[in-house]
Image (cartoon, grey):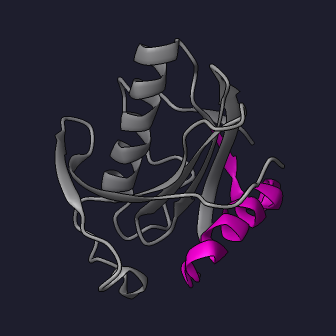
Amino acid sequence: MAYQVDFKTVSTIGLESSPVAPALAGLRANEARYFWNKYKHAFVTEPAADNPAIVARVNAILDERDMHFATQPLEVSDFVVDGVRWSYVFYQNGLVVNVLYTLEEGGKRAVGFKLSDGMPIPEEFEGKFKFARQKSKLAGTIRGSFFVIKGDYPD
């Protein structure tokens, strides 16, 4: 069932099995606030099991860097706003992977990683990425990193 994320009242709906569920829910709400404030777009997620194609697309892009996550995907989101396709996967361990893919040729294309407050840095990242820190009223301290996508993944 789809869930429109409320960034005023943070809820762990769909994320209950995560050991860092409140922080992950805050991170999800932080993303919802960003899209509402910038684009007036409602951020909607659904269970990953209901839309495995989104997880498969994100995994195909992550293959560029030989990255595979053993943790279970809990929720996904996929939408186009202002000529950019955004794909999100929220994982049980507190990791959030988002893909920014400008549809127009030559636009920005990148994969972002955000770690929920309280989760350790996954071993898949050790020695590969440095993480910047950002404070958020909704999510506490967010640690994030990214890489630029080299291949084409229109679908």
**Residue 71 inside the magenta-drawn segment:** yes
Residue at 65 percent across and 51 percent down: it is: 76
Residue at 35 percent across and 23 percent down: it is: 8
From which residue to which does the magenta span run? 45-72
Rendered view: 98 above or below 85: below
x, y percent for residue 109: 57, 46
Residue 12 or residue 92, whichever sits in front: 92
- For residue 47, side relative to residue 30 (left or right): right
x, y percent for residue 120: 26, 77
Residue at 71 percent across and 31 percent down: it is: 104
Outermost residue, top direction?
A: 40
Count of labels shown? 0
Quarter occupied by the N terminus: top right
- For residue 133, side relative to residue 53 (left or right): left
- For residue 52, side relative to residue 121 (left or right): right
Residue 139 or residue 21, whichever sits in front: 139
x, y percent for residue 79: 70, 33
Residue 150 or residue 96, whichever sits in front: 150
Rendered view: 16 above or below 67: above
x, y percent for residue 134: 18, 46
**Residue 48 inside the magenta-drawn segment:** yes
Rendered view: 107 above or below 94: above
Rendered view: 9 above or below 85: above
Residue at 24 percent across and 59 percent down: it is: 117
Q: Quadrant of residue 102?
A: top right
Residue 135 or residue 145, whichever sits in front: 145
